[in-house]
Every structure is written in structure tokens, then in C-alpha cells.
Image (spheres, grey):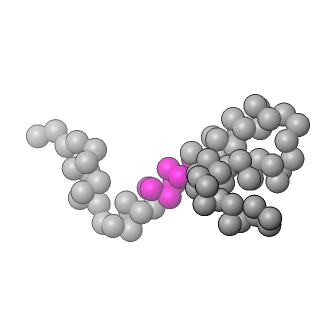
Amino acid sequence: MELTQYDLYKKMPPYRRVSIGCQLHDFAYRRLEVFLRKQMKDATDEMIKRELLKRFLGESAGIFFEGA
């Protein structure tokens, strides 16, 4: 019997699935940061952080910035 990825995740304890989800999120965040730094060469760290939050949180990211 061949197990699918879904079956493997289903057999894992919940804490392990959450851990994998967090690792995937961190990986995506770091990859996007590298991409943005290449695209926005003159951007400050603050500008990159804002763009990352906008991409991950959408319009709700504005709550993290003063005056936004």
C-alpha cells in the first residue's frame, strides 16, 4: 500500500504537523526576503519588513506601522 502525503500527515501527532507548518512558513518568509532584497536593491531593512508583512498579511499588515 502506498501512503500519500495526506496519509502521512494524518498519522502524525498534531504538534508535529504544526511544527512542519511553522517550518514551511519560515522557509517561505526567508525565500521571499531574499527575492525582495534582489528586486529592491536600495530598500532599507524597514522597507523590506513592511513589504514582507504586506505580502503575508495583506491589508491587515498596516496595524504594525505607525500612521498606516
- Specify start and end residues of the magenta stretch as a single range: 20-27
Tell me: 29 left or right of 19: right
Q: Residue furthest top?
A: 39
Q: Is residue 19 magenta?
A: no
Q: Is residue 25 magenta?
A: yes
Can residue 39 be seen here? The reply is: yes
Q: Quarter of the image containing the N terminus?
A: top left
Between residue 35 and residue 22, name the one nearer to us: 35
**Measuring 72% from the left and 38% from the top, which residue is drawn there?**
36
Counting labels gives 0
Q: As displayed, is residue 63 above or below residue 38?
A: below
**Measuring 74% from the left and 53% from the top, which residue is drawn there?**
50
Secondary structure, magenta segment, majority class: helix
**Measuring 38% from the left and 68% from the top, which residue is drawn there?**
15
Q: Residue furthest front?
A: 67
Can residue 26 be seen here? The reply is: no
Between residue 40 and residue 29, name the one nearer to us: 40
Tell me: 14 left or right of 51: left
Q: Quarter of the image containing the C terminus?
A: bottom right
Measured as percent of width and height from the top left, residue 64 is found at: 71, 65
Q: Residue furthest left?
A: 1
Measured as percent of width and height from the top left, residue 37 is found at: 77, 38
Q: As displayed, is residue 35 above or below residue 15?
A: above
Measured as percent of width and height from the top left, residue 60 is found at: 60, 60
Tell me: 36 left or right of 41: left
Measured as percent of width and height from the top left, residue 24 is found at: 50, 50
**Measuring 25% from the left and 48% from the top, which residue is drawn there?**
6
